[in-house]
């Protein structure tokens, strides 16, 4: 206990030791913040993909002879499928009624979108007034087009007639606004009733995709394998075999690149903590050189070399523990005030622009496992880096040290 008190006395009296803790705190704070933001980015991206595509997305070939009832029957036979929802997806152009874009598709007033037809039971289209079919529009797209609830919009698309595309257009009423938080997704998708979309696209049957949700404990990959096996056992014509994809494969290269980037960031920012811990060698070596007389007194009073080396290892743990606590407090404060920090760094202008980073906010998710691993690695690194100064302190010669004093 007396050696611990002595370590605390050293820490309070010599400014170089609190500065070493501050270096570790800065490294921990930056690492904590970066991982919280990056984990939040991945979490939000994965959630947005799964909200749109489900756990497994089954794309049905066009002009499939199977009916909706037949597909529902097949999906109920597959173990692991909790819910199967039909969708009709169709490409089109959208513009405000009365804008020059409707009459001249070459202008920039038209926006390319994905028309997603869903059942009314799956989505709330808000209050429906008049004879025009309702439409749910993302907040960024509504802002871009200058739409307000109740406005009429025009959809320019094509209709499949005898295998040939025929241009067509249809008016919808903007009845509800939605926001998933993901900028590109809200900008490029609008939701309408499936029957309304089928009437202008001419698709038969009235679905192009099935969104499958798995039961608890069933991974998307296992569910996709079960679906694939079930359709293979049906021995369908190869032209009628659906395309089966998990939400992860739908995320594509962008999602995989983000996940790989997390590993790279772990290595790069891990060096920040490593460099901060490395300064413990210089700090403790300097402390050993300046406190040789104290070490000699401890040895003269009966402290063994093992106890002296343990003292300096303990001193390094005091320094690193204080640095870790301060770093976690700094990181927590940063993620709670990211908007203010972003404003400071950007001079009042946003740094995380939604059209680049895909989200209209800075997502944050603290991973307790990652935080615990960061603490353990920092303490182990600090202990290893303190072994050399501790070893040198334990080899101090008592008589020579006391004579020099």
Image: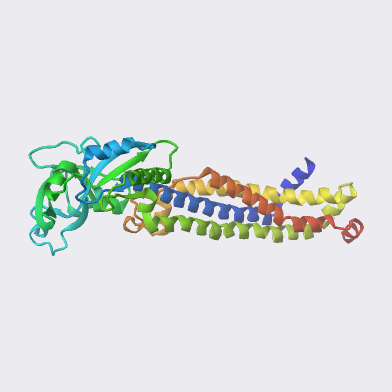
Return the residue found at the far bottom.
106
- Observer-nearest residue: 398 or 192? 192
Q: Quadrant of the C terminus?
A: bottom right
- Observer-nearest residue: 343 or 52? 52
Q: Using residue 310 as the reference point, say whether residue 400 is left or right of it.
A: right
Q: Residue 156, can we see it? A: no
- Observer-nearest residue: 268 or 300? 268
Q: Residue 41, can we see it? A: yes
Examine the rendered structure and indicate whether residue 168 appears above or below residue 213. Answer: below
Q: Using residue 334 as the reference point, say whether residue 357 is left or right of it.
A: left
| Residue 295 location (% of width, % of height) | 83, 53
| Residue 141 location (% of width, % of height) | 22, 52
Q: Quadrant of the N terminus?
A: top right
Q: Residue at x 58, y 52 (%)?
A: 25
Q: Using residue 138 as the reference point, say whether residue 275 is left or right of it.
A: right
Return the residue found at the far front.
235
Q: Residue at x 62, y 51 (%)?
A: 377
Q: How is the image coloured?
A: rainbow
- Observer-nearest residue: 388 or 176? 176
| Residue 193 location (% of width, % of height) | 18, 41
| Residue 236 location (% of width, % of height) | 29, 47
Q: Residue at x 15, y 41 (%)?
A: 195
* Count of numbered labels shown in the rendering: 0
Q: Residue at x 37, y 56 (%)?
A: 252
Please identify the quarter of the rendering in which residue 177 is found: top left
Examine the rendered structure and indicate whether residue 210 appears above or below residue 342. Answer: above
Q: Using residue 166 as the reference point, say whether residue 73 is left or right of it.
A: right
């Amino acid at each position: 206990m007396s050696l611990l008190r002595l370590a605390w006395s050293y820490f309070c009296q010599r400014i170089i030791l609190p500065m070493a803790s501050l270096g570790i705190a800065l490294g921990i704070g930056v690492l904590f913040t970066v991982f919280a933001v990056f984990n939040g980015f991945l979490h939000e991206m994965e959630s947005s993909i799964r909200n749109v595509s489900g756990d497994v997305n089954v794309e049905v070939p066009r002009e499939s002879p199977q009916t909706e009832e037949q597909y529902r029957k097949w999906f109920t036979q597959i173990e692991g499928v909790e819910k199967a929802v039909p969708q009709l997806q169709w490409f089109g152009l959208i513009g405000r009624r009365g804008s020059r874009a409707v009459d001249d598709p070459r202008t920039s007033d038209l926006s390319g979108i994905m028309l997603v037809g869903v059942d009314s039971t799956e989505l709330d289209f808000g209050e429906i007034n008049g004879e025009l079919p309702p439409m749910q529009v993302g907040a960024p797209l509504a802002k871009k087009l200058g739409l307000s609830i109740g406005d009429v919009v025009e959809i320019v698309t094509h209709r499949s007639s005898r295998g040939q595309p025929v241009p067509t257009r249809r008016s919808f009423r903007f009845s509800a606004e939605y926001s998933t938080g993901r900028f590109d997704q809200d900008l490029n998708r609008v939701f309408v009733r499936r029957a309304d979309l089928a009437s202008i696209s001419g698709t038969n049957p009235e679905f192009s995709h099935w969104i499958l949700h798995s039961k608890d404990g069933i991974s998307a990959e296992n569910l996709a394998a079960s679906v694939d096996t079930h359709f293979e056992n049906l021995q369908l014509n190869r032209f009628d075999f659906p395309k089966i994809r998990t939400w992860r494969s739908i995320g594509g290269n962008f999602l995989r690149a983000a996940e790989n980037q997390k590993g790279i960031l772990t290595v790069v920012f891990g060096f920040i903590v490593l460099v901060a811990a490395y300064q413990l060698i210089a700090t403790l070596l300097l402390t050993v050189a300046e406190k040789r007389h104290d070490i000699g007194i401890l040895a003269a009073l009966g402290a063994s070399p093992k106890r002296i080396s343990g003292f300096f290892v303990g001193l390094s743990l005091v320094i690193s523990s204080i640095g870790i606590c301060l770093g976690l407090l700094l990181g927590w404060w940063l993620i709670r005030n990211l908007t203010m920090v972003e404003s400071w760094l950007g001079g009042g202008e946003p740094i995380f622009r939604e059209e680049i980073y895909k989200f209209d906010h800075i997502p944050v998710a603290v991973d307790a496992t990652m935080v615990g691993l960061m603490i353990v690695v920092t303490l182990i690194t600090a202990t290893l880096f303190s072994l050399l100064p501790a070893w040198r302190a334990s080899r101090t010669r008592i008589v020579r040290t006391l004579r020099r004093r």
